[in-house]
Amino acid sequence: MEIKLLGTGSAEGMPGLFCRCHICQLARVERGKNLRSRSSALINGALKIDLPPDTLHHVMTHNLDLTRVEYLLFTHGHDDHFALRELQYMSWMFVEEVSETPLNLLGPADVIERVARSLNVSDLPLEFQPLCLWEPIRLDGWVITPIQAQHDPGIHCFNYLISDGHKTLLYATDTGWYEPPTWDFLMQTKLDGIVVECSKGPIEGGYMAHLCIPEVIRMREWLLENGVLSPDSPVVTTHHSHLGGMMHEELEQALNPHGVQVGFDGMVFCI
Ligand SMILES: [Zn+2]
Ligand SMILES: [Zn+2]
Ligand SMILES: [Zn+2]
């Protein structure tokens, strides 16, 4: 399975759209891996996770060809993951030829309903597949299982187990520390790699809807101790915020010794 991280930033990106903190100022100078667009990932070139407002930037920067994406999987309906109005540009008004193969939208029922309600969907080559928590769905060799994230109690927020029939990835953004049902479910699985959010940098406590560095390390250790993950399986971070106060290299110094790689925009890895 090939995983490409298209974006690895938190909601406001890095540098933050309207932020002048010292990290954002440094990121503007050093650029490179410190420039983080809103989070999204592409798996085997065919399954894309989330549709952030930076999708056109991903098309231009990472050669993303959206006409080749077969499945678009939504984690939740926050704006940095769900720029639903971009889907209108699939219509006959904006393309020479409307695709004959529909794009399959999958995600929590509230997200799918919002797409159907907000767009003139009869004009768009879309198919809709609401997903239910804990229930695997099989599609053309993929098996996708939504698991409960700890993020925003007002909406449905899913993390995903994604299998291509050979390997299984856990995609874990946006979430805070899981509640027992998610750990119990993970205990029954075998993973070959993880993409996990690390929004808060070193900051423990406070806003509990995201993970910090010590929690990411503890999560990997829990998965190793419980035989869910093996020590050589990749654990890669995403959804980093400038408010964590760390540049890419500093994140690497904190995470690499614990077997965690720091994700960056455009990173490709295989499991
Ligand atoms: Zn987010
Ligand atoms: Zn900032
Ligand atoms: Zn969110």
Image: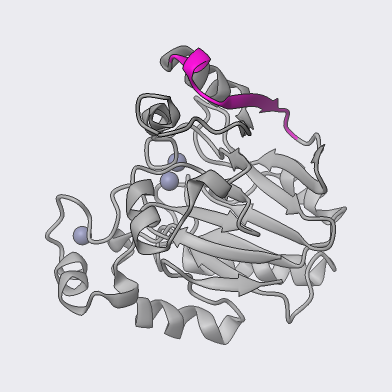
Q: Quadrant of residue 126?
A: top right
Looking at this view, name the residue that lies furthest to the front.
96
Instruction: Tell whether 43 sits left or right of 52.
Output: right
- Position of residue 195 relative to residue 82, above or below, is below
Q: Nearer the viewer, residue 203 or 89?
A: 89
Residue 49 in view of the camera: no
- In the rendered view of the protein, which quadrant contains the N terminus? bottom right
Residue occupying image coordinates x 48% and y 74%? 262
- Magenta segment: does it hold 129? yes
Residue located at (55% from left, 87% from top): 257
Q: For residue 16, which quarter of the picture? A: bottom left
Q: Is any part of residue 200 visible from this angle?
A: yes
Ligand 2 located in image quadrant: bottom left
- Residue 176: say if magenta: no
Left or right of residue 163: residue 266: left
| In the image: residue 255, left or right of residue 137 | left
Identify the colour scheme used: one colour
Percent position (x, y) of residue 29? 15, 76
- Magenta stretch, residue numbers: 120-133
Q: Front-most of 151 and 13?
A: 13
In the picture, which quadrant includes the C terminus?
bottom right
Q: Residue furthest right?
A: 188
Residue drawn at x 47%, y 47% is 208
Q: Is residue 46 left or right of residue 198?
A: right
Residue pictured at 40% horizontal, 61% vertical:
240
Q: Position of residue 18 (x, y in %)?
A: 14, 50
Report the front residue among 186 and 91. 91
